[in-house]
Amino acid sequence: MLITKASEYAILSLIVLSKANAPMDSETLSQELSISKSFLAKILQALAKNGVLHSYKGVNGGFSLAKAPKDIDMLQVMLSVEGKAPAVFECAPSINSCPSKKANICSIWPFLNKLQGKIDSFLSNLTLADILED
């Protein structure tokens, strides 16, 4: 699946955080977005670990954007929360890494590979700022 719930919730959280005047904690965000607090906390921690968010501890702690919205691309967000690039298809990214060793005779692999490349390019060029404009 290209966009999982984790990616969707990450993007929704980034939209809310981009409009906040101060760091927001995971409980407040989870209530505002009607998302499980424990699931959202894992997503926010992954985004902080990968430099998308700042994490603050303490009474006034929470999360805030670590970068300007124009510098946060959606491929980076999805890689952060999924641990891998979003895939259009369950196939090897190169002919040489095909587990069935049949990629060179697969008639659909070249098409799917081109499609994946276009999607990766689109996501790496789509920023949080672009989403906020819509």
Image (tube, helix red, strand yellow):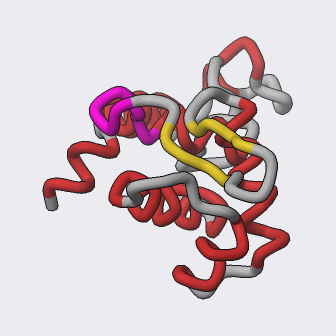
Image coordinates for residue 106, horizontal then vertical, percent: 59, 33
Residue at left 63%, top 69%? 5
Q: Left or right? Give the position of 40 relative to 14.
A: right
Image coordinates for residue 69, horizontal then vertical, percent: 33, 38
Which span of residues is magenta-colored?
A: 68-74
Decide if residue 119 is in sight here. yes
Image quadrant in which you'd find residue 29: bottom right
Residue at left 38%, top 38%? 123
Q: Left or right? Give the position of 99 relative to 74.
A: right
Placement of the C terminus among the 4 image quadrants: bottom left
Placement of the N terminus among the 4 image quadrants: bottom right
Image coordinates for residue 25, horizontal then vertical, percent: 67, 63
Q: Camera-side residue: 64 or 50?
A: 64
Relative vertical location of residue 6 with respect to residue 101 in this rendering, above or below = below
Residue at left 57%, top 66%? 9
Q: Camera-side residue: 49 or 55?
A: 55
Relative vertical location of residue 122 with respect to residue 81 in this rendering, above or below = above
Residue at left 65%, top 41%? 47
User: Residue extending furthest left?
Assistant: 133
